[in-house]
Image (cartoon, rainbow, N blue to C red):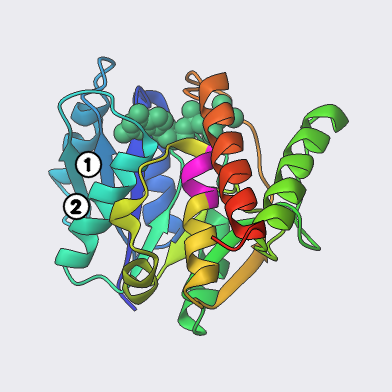
Amino acid sequence: MRALVVMPTYNESENLAKMIPALREAVPEADLLIVDDSSPDGTAQVVQGFMENDDAVHLLSRPAKSGLGGAYREGFRWGIDHGYDALVEMDADFSHDPEQLPSLLAAAAGGAGLVIGSRYVAGGTIPKWSWQRTMLSKGGNLYSSALLGLNVKDATAGFRVYSPEALGLIGYQEVTLDGYGFQVEMTYRARRAGVKILEVPISFVDREVGESKMSGSIVVEALVMVTRRGIGRLFGR
Ligand SMILES: Nc1nc2c(ncn2[C@@H]2O[C@H](COP(=O)(O)OP(=O)(O)OP(=O)(O)O)[C@@H](O)[C@H]2O)c(=O)[nH]1
Ligand SMILES: [Mg+2]
């Protein structure tokens, strides 16, 4: 299986300096595509430094910060065009542990079209979250899963593996949401298209360096989408 890790970045130079070697060591057989939105902190230069001695590292530069969803759409497109047969979604901020990627890839190799690194299946953990934050995230997931019939415990998770066939069935290029909304919509479309979905437990940690790019509007966007789709689904549309 030829795997490509698609990693969107905005101002992650400090994290990437450690993430690229960590990934190359944990999963040497996987290639890496950083999709950077012209980060002012020199993220692209860090990637270019690694590219000088490592053919497995690639960079896709976009002219301006334009959201996580678009970064994944362009990254997936690049990976499919280059013949990869597993496309990984992963954050650069060490929330997703490179050492856990092999277990996700094993599930993909076993035939799942969508593998979700899940915080809410048995064995999944979030060591540092307060109970309030955990409840909010779990609640959002319960709401989405119930309304959309996802039957997935962690539909907002962003540590995933897709097969190119699954991405085709999903119609990923039509998913224009960002952040959580992107993840939930991709899951919904996968379920509706009959893609085999498997959740694998992960341990999720908060970023230690760099700034979060998530905003309230991204949460609202996701909630509105789920509610709209849920109502449409209930009334048979
Ligand atoms: N290319 C690109 N990458 C982005 C954009 N927004 C976020 N990212 C990257 O997407 C990944 C996840 O973003 P985070 O800000 O950590 O979002 P999060 O993990 O949902 O939220 P936190 O809990 O704050 O970490 C990181 O690698 C970011 O650098 C964007 O607009 N463009
Ligand atoms: Mg993060």
Residue 87 is drawn in which quadrant? Answer: bottom left
Q: Where is residue 88? Give x, y as percent.
A: 40, 59
Q: Is mark 2 within 8 Å of ligand 1?
A: no
Q: Where is residue 16? Give x, y as percent.
A: 37, 34
Q: Residues within 10 Å of mark 2 (few under 14, many from 20)?
A: few
Residue 62 is drawn in which quadrant? Answer: top left
- In this view of the protein, can residue 32 be seen by the observer? no
- In this view of the protein, can residue 217 be seen by the observer? yes
Quarter occupied by the N terminus: bottom left
Q: How many labels, in total?
A: 2
Find out whether the residues at labels 2 and 1 contact each other: C-beta distance under 8 Å: yes
Residue 217 located left or right of residue 133: left
Q: Nearer the viewer, residue 1 or 158?
A: 158
Residue 122 located left or right of residue 171: right
Q: Where is residue 45? Give x, y as percent.
A: 19, 28
Magenta-tinted stretch: 180-184
Amino acid bearing label 1: Phe
Which residue lies under the disc numbered 1?
A: 50
Element class at badge 2: loop
Amino acid bearing label 2: Asp
Element class at badge 1: helix
Q: Where is residue 82? Give x, y as percent.
A: 15, 66
Q: Please say if 129 is above or below 189.
A: above
Residue 5 located left or right of residue 151: left
Q: Please say if 136 is above or below 186.
A: above
Q: Nearer the viewer, residue 66 or 45?
A: 66
Q: Tell me, for residue 54, which label it has, or none.
A: 2
The majority secondary structure of the magenta stretch comes to helix
Q: Residues within 10 Å of mark 1 (few under 14, many from 20)?
A: some
Is residue 109 one of those drawn in magenta? no
* Residue drawn at the location 76% of the way across and 61% of the way down: 121
